[in-house]
Amino acid sequence: MARHIDILEHPQTAIEVASATLAEGLPIGLPTETVYGLAADATNPAAITRIYETKGRPRFNPLICHMSDLAMAERYAIFDPISRKLAEAFWPGPLTLVLPLRPESGIHPLATAGLDTVGIRVPQGFAGELIRAFGKPLAAPSANTSGKISATSADHVDDDLGERITLILDAGASVVGVESTIVKVEDGELRLLRPGGLAAREIERVAGKAVKRKRGAAPAIEAPGMLASHYAPGAAVRLDATDVSPDEALIRFGTPEIAGIGNAVAVLDLSPSGDLSEAAANLFDFMKRADATGAVTIAFSHIPDEGLGEAINDRLRRAAAPRA
Ligand code: AMP
Ligand code: MG
């Protein structure tokens, strides 16, 4: 069983115990503003191997390396002017930049799946402080079994991975609720590798140029979070529902008209007022709650594709994709 430490009540203990656990090469459940991460020393191959094993994650899927600040990030990766501008504007925050790795950086090739680039992010709050205290970058994918719904609370982490890890830090519910937005600057172009907790239009505003979106499925090595089926509950998922049947749970956004709503197994409201940030924060928890009702299918009402809706719809399309 994993030990839990509440970081608000015991911040110093949390830093000390987490640093000691990480130094042993063990992964920990780490709260960040996006989702809970399964974090380990990005320079230690045994520690990184434990991340892949604990999640059952394919090893061709690179991990995001988390830094305490831009100065630390610059020691590991080479920044072009646009990437630096984005880092200055949005770090700490839900933005991951894919950048050329510095030779001899010390980040182990297992963390980058052998690529000559590295995905880097500076998380807000406690996670950044822990990295500063630990002194090394932390590789951290979401703290859930690969392909399943991401964890946005310490209890989610415990339910899924509690038997396989020794420490979970608890900071309550993740504020953003979806993973980071991933961008890469290539030949002066800004490519969106994954929509996430920072709306693409915010990035465009700072960069002064449009982000390019991929059409169709991205190559697995660059965007494996992008493999068709991911974020999958046990139940089937149906999108853009305008009605609901008696064996379905309904997850609504705003207050749409839904036929048959009185018969649904459960009805959950992502954001009655139609606020996409609130919906993102509730998304994964509500998917788990709807799944726990035993409903055969989870039906979602339409969610607009603007702002954080792009990330929400990306996750929902993968949750609805045919399972392998
Ligand atoms: P997560 O599953 O949230 O840890 O996100 C990891 C994702 O970051 C991967 O699935 C990739 O899409 C992306 N990523 C990480 N490192 C790289 C990299 N060097 N090049 C391209 N994408 C990367
Ligand atoms: Mg994940």
Image (cartoon, rainbow, N blue to C red):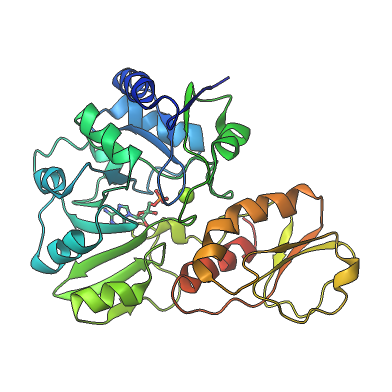
In the rendered image, the vertical position of residue 5 relative to residue 148, given as above or below:
above
Q: Position of residue 263 (x, y in %)?
A: 91, 67
Question: With 245 as the anchor, is 298 left or right in this view?
Answer: left
What is the residue that sits farthest to the front in this orientation? 9
Left or right of 154 in this view: 200 = left
* Of the pair 158 and 15, the residue shown nearer to us: 15
Q: Is residue 27 left or right of residue 185?
A: right
Residue drawn at (33%, 43%), measured in percent from left and top? 125
Q: Residue 318 appears at what percent x and percent y?
A: 56, 63
Question: Which image quarter: residue 112?
Answer: top left
- Whether 31 is drawn above or below 43: the answer is below
Q: Does residue 294 lie above or below 274 as drawn?
A: above
Considering depth in this image, is 281 or 166 the residue closer to the camera? 281
Looking at the rendered image, the quarter that the C terminus falls into is bottom right
Asked where in the image residue 130 lies, by quadrant, the reply is top left
Q: Position of residue 55 (x, y in %)?
A: 50, 37
In front of the other: 293 or 139: 293
Q: Residue at x 27, y 52 (%)?
A: 92
Would residue 180 be visible to someone looking at this image?
Answer: yes
Q: Quadrant of the N terminus?
A: top right
Q: Position of residue 24 (x, y in %)?
A: 33, 17
Query: Which residue appears at 23% of the width and 37% of the height?
Result: 137
In the image, residue 5 sits, relative to residue 64, either above or below, namely above
